[in-house]
Amino acid sequence: MEKLYLLALQNIHGIGPVRAKSLIAYCGSAEAIFRLSQQKLLKIPNIGEQTAKLIVGGTSLRDAESELHFCEKNNIEVISCYEQNYPNLLKQISDSPIILFKKGNLNLNQKMAIAVVGTRDSTHYGRSITEKFVFAFVQANLNIVSGLAVGIDITAHKAALHHKGTTTCVLAHGLDRIYPPHHKSVAEEILLNGAWLSEYPSKTKPDAVNFPERNRIIAGMCVATLVVEARPRGGALITARLAFNENREVYAIPGDVERHSAKGTNELIKQNIAKLVTEPEDILADLNLVQVMKKETSNKPLLPLTPEEQQIIRLLQDKDCVIDELLLKTDIPPGKLFSLLLDMEFKGLVIQLPGKKFKLL
């Protein structure tokens, strides 16, 4: 029953999370707030006439009942900030939502979470780096959190799924839809080994104002945030600064100083908001997760190799080779060779050196 009143309170316009928690503390429970008369509500500090009217005579309770029915029908879990299954780290920030909506079976406190965010205008370099870091994070048993947006976000989700890891998408709208719509297939796959998360009830559209608000959840539920590519202004920088302000670790991949998509990350490093990282191990070591990763991966069986991968390994056993040598000696089409080498990097079989030279690990 209390959850009904919490949800109704969250849905009242003008009552944000901080104010809601203050009201609950003052009155003893969310239900107690709705049991008060308008006259008594007006005696509570910071409760104006308009807010008191909305509590007493508004539609928030009726809307909350309808929302709970929708959630039950659509397998959406409604989690209050007073429950154990609410993300532990998110509870620590003052403006965390009093209610979250979750779809998917992932226990949000089962694994340590790390945010991977960046620009929608990502480059091939940015996407490749994202895949490399996410692979290492999956190996370290981290939950990859991002926003399902075009660019770095969707790359992070896809990489986590590809490597059989868990991933959570935090959405800026209700869980009755997916935005952008063309990411629906990825979102559906996330439900198999991850979760959708939002503070917004159904029928909430992905309005622009929701995205910066959503980013505090991404930053707040994670032990750290990695920014791969970011423009001088954008959601990734908002997430990074929110994480920094909550004393969470922030990391950034440095980029070409003349490239617009790297200006934000370079500025985060320049301002000492983010630590410069070039390898996943930089982050894992900083978070004391390197030994964890080694323990979890040391007993894994070797992955079966394709004939093409075996051919590449035989060539690299003799010497390190630049990409042109591998193209010449293998007769593998360029596109397929690049894809194979990237996958072999993920598997920890090869490493790329400067000058597009590859070395066997």
Image (tube, helix red, strand yellow):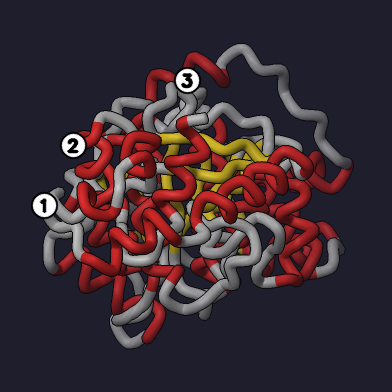
Q: Nearer the viewer, mark 3 or mark 2?
A: 2
Q: Residues within 10 Å of mark 3 (few under 14, many from 20)?
A: few
The span from disc 2 to disc 1 (Cα, nearest Å) is 9 Å
Q: Which mark is residue 102?
A: none
Q: Identify the amino acid type marked 2.
A: Tyr
Location of residue 77 in the rendering, given as x and y in whole percent from the top left corner: 62, 36
List the residue tagged with mark 2: 26
Viewer-proximal residue, 144 or 359? 144
Label 2–label 1 contact, CB within 8 A: yes
What x and y, as percent, mark residue 231? Answer: 36, 79
Question: Is residue 318 at all visible to an observer of this figure?
Answer: no
Q: Which residue is mark 3?
A: 294
Tell me the mark number nearer the camera, choosing from 1 and 3: 1
Q: In the image, is residue 71 above or below residue 12?
A: above
Q: Earlier in the sequence, mark 1 or mark 3?
A: 1
- The residue labelled by disc 1 is 45
- Give residue 348's quadrant in the image: top right
The x and y percentages for residue 200 are 52, 57
Label pair 1/3, CB-CB below 8 angstroms:
no
Give the image quarter of residue 301: top right
Q: Secondary structure at mark 1?
A: loop
Residue 296 is situated, as x and y percent measured from the top left of the image, at 54, 17
* Mark-to-mark CA distance, 3 and 2: 49 Å
Q: Dot 2: what SS? A: helix
Q: Is residue 245 visible?
A: yes
Q: Quadrant of residue 69?
A: top right
Q: Which residue occupies 64% across, 58% down? A: 202
Amino acid bearing label 1: Pro
